Image: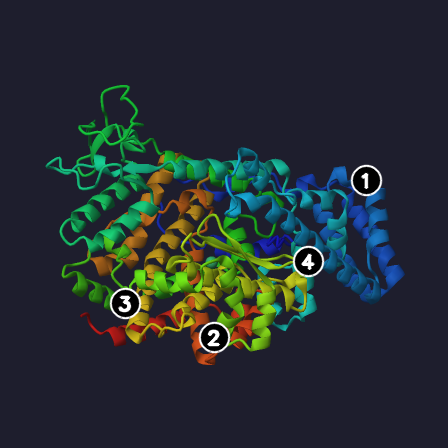
Amino acid sequence: MRLAIYLALLTAAVTVLGPQVHSWEVPVPSSTNSPTASMAASQTSAAEVTPSWVKDSVAKMERELVAKYGELQRARVQRGLQQVAEFWRAEDGDAATFEDFVRANFAGDQVTLDTMFNRLESLLEQLGGHMHEINREFRQQSDLDLGPVLPFDEIIGGYDPSAHVLDDFFQNKLAFVVLLNFPLTRLDQRLKDGPSWSRRQWAEARLAQGFSKRIPADVNLGIAQAEAQAGQYIAEYNIWMYHLVDAQRQRLFPPKMRLLSHWNLRDEIKADYADSSGGLAKQRMIQQVMERIVTQTIPAEVVNNPAFDWNPFTNDVTTAAAKDSDTATVPAAKPNNAREPDTRYATLQKTFFASRKADPYSPTAPTLIARRFNEDREIPEARVRAMLEQVLTSPLVPQVAKLIESRLKRPLEPFDVWYSGFRPGSQYTEAQLDEMIAKKYPTARAYQQDIPNLLMKLGFSPERAQYVARNIVVDPARGSGHAMGAEMRAEKAHLRTRVEKGGMNYKGFNIAVHEMGHNVEQTFSLNDIDHTLLKGVPNTAFTEALAFVFQGHDLELLGLPAPDARSQSEKTLNDFWGTYEIAGVALVDMAVWHWMYDHPRATPKELNDATVLISKDVWNQYYAPVFHKKDVVLLGIYSHMIDSFLYLPDYPIGHMIAFQIEEQMKKAGSIGPEFERMAKMGDVTPDLWMENATGHPVGPEALLAATQSALASVGGGR
Ligand SMILES: [Zn+2]
């Protein structure tokens, strides 16, 4: 139940965020120039909802509490009163109610404060743990391979019993008890002072953070609705590939092929490298389609519609001359190529408008941008940008690019940002591995019984291996598999894995090993940590990195030799090129959100123009020197940019974190004890976690070093 939301009370804190929020310098179209000030004018400020008597009551209670508990408590009294005042609304009660509440609930001595802290920590663990338990049980039918899912199962599975907990706790004033006694902190404080905090101080900081926002229900609902709408727009954005025609009216793609933007389109580009005769033409055509989506010059009628043929180069639309679908809508009018009317950007803008409504209730992270970086990621935006630029401007980029060109035997084209030719070789075919694994694991139970043995192979002592295995339950998954950790110590972590009728196959095993990595992390970071308020890891990139460590050793777990150096180098180069690609995409995402905040009254068309300009600018700065082509807009194609609220920077950071952890594991030699040591650090800031794990803050150095040596080992092409 981590509510990673932080706000502070002093308005001065806003200036701390200011420089980060406004430091982006991508040029924007001159046609749009509404300044930030006009936006501020249209927003409610949190101060407007604070009752007018609060100031006097705060002063009165400060005098009273200091008189009662002594001068030494003054700083705590002031802080607590400020924090309560910040969130108190007229409906919470009048001045007398406020004063009585403060009188009754301020813990003015250490013994009372310790009792309060310990009890809250234990009870919140129980609450989160049981809520999660209900969730898991309610989702059982949809998550596990237990036969048909009926419509009512979906209703049950979608129910979240904890949805109103935060509202309830403001209503019954438990939230105010926490705010009165424990410190709200800002990211700059956690970064600066956090390294010298005691574990108890960290736990108190996380406790308070759980109550650091009070966003009105209608604002949250608006955000959820905008998110759902954007998700829907993205989920239905298919391109019917058979209906793409070239200048000779040839169809390059097979009938019925329907690709979702951008994932399937991108993956088709990756797959086309294997097609030595027709692949290049297909890749060029997909690039053209992507560019028309970004610029919104795509004809509206060809989106998710097999009724028309479309030449994405000339943009000609004709009635489909061949049929590959029964669902083709009969053309209402003559085919035309009227462009999609900026729906992509209108959709994105709605997520911005909805997010912005939460700003006044988040005074020290007063934009979605600040909330994403300072609260969710806990790495300042300026640092994230610097890390991305470090990858983008690395001298390794042209070297890897050269290697790709030598393998392709042609100059790079823009879609080669998705080059997929770095592949680890394998001594075994997948069929051989399937056979081996099916024999070893005919059932999920067989895998469960082997867990201690697998963990010992990863370097865990027999005792630790048995201990962890006792905390993992293996269930048969309906889908490909996932890990579901517990939220309280009385519960176990669940490993959901797919076992086919004939036994587990290699894909299933590979995923099971990954998910087992999650379960082991979840067990240590809950059951073996000093404070349950610090359970978990800083963010998903960390648990993914730890799971990848396990996954990377799956062959050894089968008693087979580890991937050789060449294989590992190929994998590293693949990850490096992927990080280079997604780093630019992340910069575009960041710049577009800044632009929206700077131009809150822009039209969707203006946002379209700005996104195109930003995409070109990032491309021209970091990709054109390598690709020798300017003004490419491909970096703007990611669907996440439309429906995921500035999520994209997580990907490149995730790659960097994975390499740092991987490198540390290699240094340590044995995975087991090192894994346990890292996982017990818990939910502190990413930099502090990484300092403890590796001796360095989060950064791209490990990735770059690994790439350097991979290049040396692979050489200048084969
Ligand atoms: Zn995972």
Q: CA distance from mark 2 to mark 1?
A: 64 Å
Q: CA distance from mark 2 to mark 4?
A: 38 Å
Ligand 1 within 8 angstroms of badge 4 C-beta: no
Say which of 461 and 718 sits in front: 461
The location of residue 127, given as percent across then percent down, is 70, 52
Residue, x 18% and y 64% (percent of image)? 407
Residue, x 86% and y 47% (percent of image)? 100
Q: Nearer the viewer, mark 2 or mark 1?
A: 2
Q: In the rendered view, would you say 443 is above or below 562?
A: above
Q: CA distance from mark 3 to mark 1?
A: 71 Å
Q: In the rendered view, would you say 140 is above or below 255?
A: below
Circle 2 residue: 457
User: Given the image, on which type of amino acid does mark 1 rest?
Assistant: Asp
User: Given the image, on which type of amino acid does mark 3 rest?
Assistant: Gly
The location of residue 145, given as percent across then percent down, is 50, 47
Q: CA distance from mark 3 to mark 2?
A: 23 Å
Residue, x 61% and y 38% (percent of image)? 44
Q: Residues within 10 Å of mark 3 (few under 14, many from 20)?
A: some
Q: Which mark is residue 425?
A: 3
SS class, disc 2 = helix
The location of residue 76, given as percent across then percent down, is 77, 61
The part of the image, by quadrant, that contains residue 534 is bottom right
Circle 1 residue: 94
Q: CA distance from mark 4 to mark 3?
A: 48 Å
The part of the image, by quadrant, that contains residue 660 is bottom left
**Sequence-first tag of 2 and 4:** 4
**Sequence-first tag of 4 and 1:** 1
**Sequence-first tag of 3 and 2:** 3
**Sequence-first tag of 4 and 3:** 4
Farthest residue to the right: give it.
68
Q: In the rendered view, would you say 656 is above or below 642?
A: below
**Sequence-first tag of 3 and 1:** 1
